[in-house]
Image (cartoon, rainbow, N blue to C red):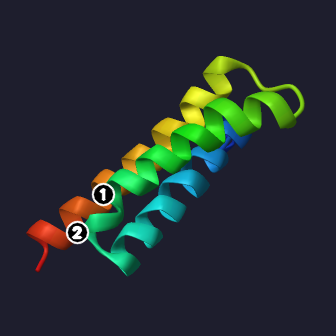
Amino acid sequence: MNILEKIVTPSFVAFQAHCWFAYAIVVTFGLNTLPWVVGAAAVKEFYVDKHFEANQSFSDNLQDWTGYVAGALLAVCALRYLK
């Protein structure tokens, strides 16, 4: 097993997908959407996925929500500091 097989796991890919999805929304629609993105992500992960997605634990939902928050924070950095 090489180093990439140890790093690139399904949970890593899922984290990246959530991160870049939130990043794209905030960069596209602006910083005013930041609270809506974080709030909608929390509802999606902790209510919808908990009740309607099979085999979801709290830690799975927390990791996905953390991905959304990380993407939103990256977008804030990109919009504020990289101009």
Which quadrant holds the C terminus?
A: bottom left
Image location of residue 5, percent across then percent down:
69, 42
According to the picture, the residue beneath numbered tag 1 turns out to be 74
Confirm whether residue 17 shows in the render: yes
Q: State which quadrant residue 17 falls in.
A: bottom right
User: Residue lying furthest top in this view?
Assistant: 58
Element type where label 1 sits in the image: helix
Picture quadrant where residue 23 is located: bottom left
The type of residue carrying mark 2 is Ala
Q: In the rendered view, does 68 fall on the left or right side of 8?
A: left
Q: Amino acid at mark 1?
A: Leu
Q: Does residue 2 sit above or below 75 in this rendering?
A: above
Nearest the camera: 74 or 8? 74
Quarter of the image for the N terminus: give it. Answer: top right
Q: Is the residue marked by circle 1 packed among few (<14), some (14-19), or many (20+) residues within 10 Å?
A: some
Contact, CB < 8 Å: mark 2 with mark 1?
A: yes
Q: Position of residue 18 (x, y in %)?
A: 57, 52
Residue 81: give x, y in percent of width and height.
10, 67
How far is the residue under mark 2 from the one under mark 1?
6 Å
- Disc number placed over residue 64 in the picture, else none: none
Give the residue at x 38% y 46%: 70
Residue at position x 54%, y 46% in the image = 41
**Left or right: 41, with 48 as reference point:** left
Q: Is residue 51 above or below residue 82?
A: above
Q: Is residue 24 above or below residue 9?
A: below
Q: Which residue is mark 2?
A: 78
